[in-house]
């Protein structure tokens, strides 16, 4: 089964011309890896937050978003996560994509230019219309939450 392809227009930020474009690393990948566009390198100390540029601006089509997600290898091996995970790049945003990394590990973490720091996933996002009502349809679960199933 083939997947639907959506064209994404992009522009590289001045100084990021040497960086490769994000790409799917395998045929079954959901996300494209994003690279760091730092000058030289950046050290993120344990507990520290750092906003890392990617050097890319992307025009996301209306009705879609780009979700910026952590890379599992960075999380498992180094404790590196993304604070607002998943981050959202809206269809009307035209600025540079930046990633908010946090070091939850025990050691300083070095981000070098061209390091793969996150992945982006293109997602369809319909807009909802809210309709006020006096009663909601009931379900088996109803209001159960916060561990109600054990």
Image: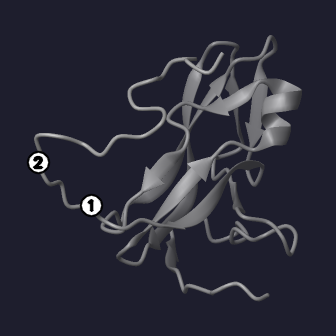
Which residue is more in the foreground, 127 or 64?
A: 127
Image location (x, y in percent) of residue 103: 68, 22
- Check disc 2 and report its element: helix, strand or loop: loop
Instruction: Please tell me in which quadrant of the rendered image residue 44 appears.
Output: top right
Instruction: Please state which of residues 67 and 142 is positioned toward the viewer in this rendering.
Output: 142
| Residue depicted at 77% across the width and 26% down the height | 109
> Quadrant location of residue 94?
bottom left
Name the image quarter holding the C terminus.
top right
Name the residue: 85% across, 30% down.
Answer: 76
Q: Is residue 91 left or right of residue 105?
A: left
Residue 39 picture location, percent across and down: 64, 46
**Image quadrant containing the N terminus:** bottom right
Q: Which mark is residue 132?
A: 2
Residue located beneath label 1 in the image: 128
Whole-percent x, y for residue 127 in the image: 29, 64
Marks 1/2: CA–CA distance: 13 Å
- Residue 18 position (above or below residue 96): below
* Quarter holding residue 149: top right
How dense is the environment of label 2, judged by Cα within 10 Å: few (below 14), some, or many (20 and up)? few
- What secondary structure is found at the residue carrying circle 1? loop
Q: Is residue 18 visible?
A: yes
Q: Is residue 150 above or below residue 6?
A: above
């Amino acid at each position: 089964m083939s997947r639907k392809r959506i064209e994404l227009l992009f522009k590289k930020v001045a100084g990021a011309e040497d960086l490769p474009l994000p790409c799917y690393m395998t045929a079954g990948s959901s996300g494209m890896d994003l690279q760091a566009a730092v000058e030289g390198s950046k050290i993120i100390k344990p507990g520290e937050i750092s906003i890392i540029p990617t050097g890319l601006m992307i025009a996301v089509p209306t009705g879609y978003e780009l979700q910026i997600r952590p890379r599992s290898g960075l999380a498992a091996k180094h404790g590196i996560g993304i604070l607002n995970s998943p981050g959202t790049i809206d269809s009307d945003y035209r600025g540079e994509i930046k990633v908010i990394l946090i070091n939850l590990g025990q050691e300083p973490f070095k981000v070098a230019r061209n390091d793969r720091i996150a992945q982006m996933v293109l997602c369809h996002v319909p807009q909802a219309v809210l309709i006020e009502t006096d009663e909601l349809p009931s379900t088996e679960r109803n209001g159960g939450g916060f561990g109600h199933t054990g």
